[in-house]
Image (cartoon, rainbow, N blue to C red):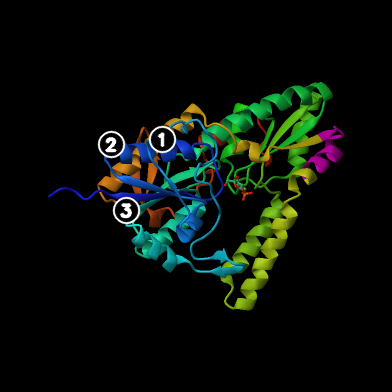
Amino acid sequence: MAKKIKRIGILTAGGDSPGLNAAIRGVGKTALGYYGMEIIGFRDGFRGLVENHRLKLDKSTLSGILTVGGTILGTSRDKPHRMVIDGRTKDMTEVIKQNYKTWGLDCVVCLGGGGTQKNALRLHQAGLNVITLPKTIDNDVAMTDATFGFATALDIATETLDRLHSTAHSHHRIIVAEIMGHRAGWLSLGSGIAGGADVILIPEIPYDVESIATAIRRRSKHGTNFSIVAVAEGAMSRDDARAFAAAEKKLERSRTLHDKKEAKMEIAGLELRHQGNTLRLAKQLEELTHLESRVTILGYVQRGGTPSAADRLLATRLGSACADLIDQERYGVMVAARGEGTEPVPLERVAGKRKTVPLDHSWIKTARRVGTCMGDA
Ligand code: F6P
């Protein structure tokens, strides 16, 4: 008997990242051209599945997108089970299930980071066939060697640190460069090493401002009157890290709704205060070292533009392997990068976990050995 032609849906969710189009193309070209499947793109993340907002994906739409930044499908941070519809937050899981059926889908491919893995697992548990790909510039998705988007952002952040060197050197200044990464230090650590930052601050190692100032003063004493500080957006002083940990523990231990609400408000307050952290740090360093200091926040530049060759290759590899898994009907998995190959990992082992930098990671050792201050000594 002839095999039924499979029809798959595909969406991109969460913050955009370079390589998303390369991944859409990788899934699409293999699914269409190699396996003869049909493919429908859903716009703006999970919202497209709710609102039936689609983009036809055929040979011509998939052509010419390999090098293009962003995502041709659009993206959003909408969650299927908590979506704002007409100003009200609603659980749209049943609507998604109905639309999945109406469109005769055999599987939905969700391209995203940590949040997307959780949302995809929920849909899988609700009865949908789901496969995910790991995307984010933060590189913090669990159970995969790498995520696409990271390599490009690493190149951009490194080039920025390179450029900051000459101006910091000319003006004898401290330049504090804030780098993205959410609550993981991969991007700051990697670009800090590659870009020769003098100080690298990551969330995994709470810092002591005095120790950083001592390292900078030591450089001045040896005749180098400038310093580059690469600080992860999630990096914190020891005091702040303690306060966050206490509030998170409080939330974890809350038994009543009232206690939960109070702990959540405390965390929100700390998060709000943290937003000005890089500026505060630069000011403190200026006061402690008597060197003029400036701040550069890299921001969304790190997520924009054409993907690097490494990201195009990774995204294409993962995308193509995803089509193989659909052909084999292996659902409920994330296509992880494993060495030169790929591996399907059950979503239960990925969702809700975050891959942070282990304290014994070789990058941390390397940074310390070349004399980089990590903020703790
Ligand atoms: O996850 C990618 C990321 O760029 C993080 O590095 C950053 O914390 C966050 O997204 C910013 O999110 P948004 O696009 O919602 O401002």
Q: Position of residue 116 (x, y in %)?
A: 48, 53
Q: Cβ(mark 3) to ligand 1 < 8 Å?
A: no
Q: CA distance from mark 3 to mark 1?
A: 28 Å
Q: Position of residue 137 (x, y in %)?
A: 55, 40
Answer left or right for 306 relative to 24.
Answer: right
Task: Inspect this view and state whether residue 196 appears.
Answer: no
Residue 331 is labelled as 3
User: Magenta segment, which residues?
Assistant: 281-293
Please tell me whether mark 1 sits on a helix, a strand or a loop.
helix
Up-down relation of residue 275 to residue 368 (above or below): below
Q: CA distance from mark 2 to mark 3?
A: 19 Å
Answer left or right for 70 relative to 163.
Answer: left
| Three-letter amino acid code of the residue under disc 2 | Tyr
Residue at image position (72%, 52%) is: 274
Q: Residue under label 1, please give it.
A: 60
Other-residue count near label 1 (Cα within 10 Å), few / some / many at <14 / 14–19 / ≥20? few
Q: Name the N-terminal-most of marks 2 and 1.
A: 2
Answer left or right for 332 relative to 110.
Answer: left
Q: Position of residue 375 (x, y in %)?
A: 69, 40
Q: Residue under label 2, please give it.
A: 34
Q: CA distance from mark 2 to mark 1?
A: 16 Å
Mark 2, mark 1: which one is toward the viewer? 1
Up-down relation of residue 78 to residue 179 (above or below): below
Q: Position of residue 193 (x, y in %)?
A: 60, 30
